[in-house]
Amino acid sequence: MNELVNQLRPSFEDREYRAAYAESFMNSLVAAQIKVIREQRGLSQQELAELVGTQQAGISRLENTNYAAWKVQTLAKLARAFDVRLRISFEEFGTLPEELDKFGREFLKRCEYSKDKVFNAENSGSNSAPELSAKEQEALAPGANRNNVVEMEKKANATHFDTTREGSGIPGMAKPIAEKKPASGDDGAEASGEMSVSNLPKGA
């Protein structure tokens, strides 16, 4: 990770370069994730196109890493078709190296709601809440000291937000991504230059 940061730091001193690099990576990530999740669902491009109300060529265009004219409405339709939520957020540049390092098929996969471990307890490997320790039971008992309860809440929150995950990288991702020009054409235009997601690592 530190090696990747050191490689990017000199070029990232240029405001335009780091913006173009981040945008290029975003386009690659979105296009690759659409293809990975589609294949995870066992859908063909034609089947996904029917679900979102477009043509097969339109899905091919969206899976093209050169595409850059993303529309929130289109991404929202894909999220509905995949039965996942769409998240759009602004991030600091410091989060980019970790995403580059983890980029791969397993990192891009997302389960549909029926297999969501949070909302479907039967898929989480446990159907019951963890047993409370004697100290926790004492803290939650009627008349318990409020300070004990606050400490428990702090501990629970710290555990909840520990989202560190282990993953493998993709050879060559440390190299700067060339700035790409937005692809032109409508949804019916056949795209070229699709990402070969089959070459992505099988594990994260």
Image (cartoon, rainbow, N blue to C red):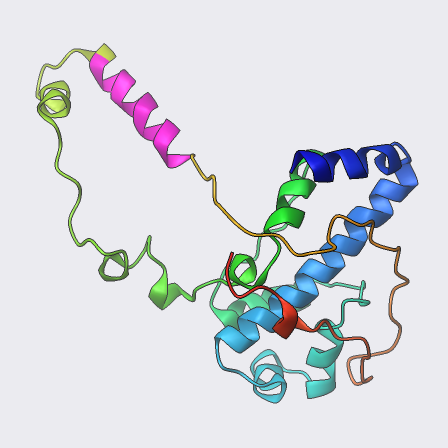
Q: Is residue 78 above or below residue 97?
A: below
Quarter of the figure with residue 55: bottom right
Tell me: 76 left or right of 19.
left
Can you give x and y, in whole percent of width and height, for residue 202 in the image? 53, 66
Can you give x and y, in whole percent of width and height, for residue 114 in the image? 35, 67
Name the residue rendered at 62%, 88% in the picture.
Answer: 46
Tell me: 73 left or right of 156.
right
State the count of labels. 0
Can you give x and y, in whole percent of width and height, for residue 129 in the image? 17, 44
Q: Is residue 57 visible?
A: yes
Image quadrant holding the N terminus, namely top right
Name the residue rendered at 72%, 72% in the picture.
Answer: 62
Q: Is residue 77 visible?
A: no
Name the residue rendered at 79%, 51% in the picture.
Answer: 23
Can you give x and y, in whole percent of width and height, for residue 3 in the image? 71, 37
Quarter of the figure with residue 47: bottom right
Q: Is residue 102 above or below residue 52?
A: above
Quarter of the figure with residue 153: top left
Q: Which residues are magenta?
A: 148-161
Does the magenta segment cover residue 155?
Answer: yes
Does the magenta segment cover residue 40?
Answer: no
Tell me: 202 left or right of 93.
left
Name the residue rendered at 48%, 76% in the picture.
Answer: 41
Q: Magenta part mainly helix, strand or loop?
A: helix
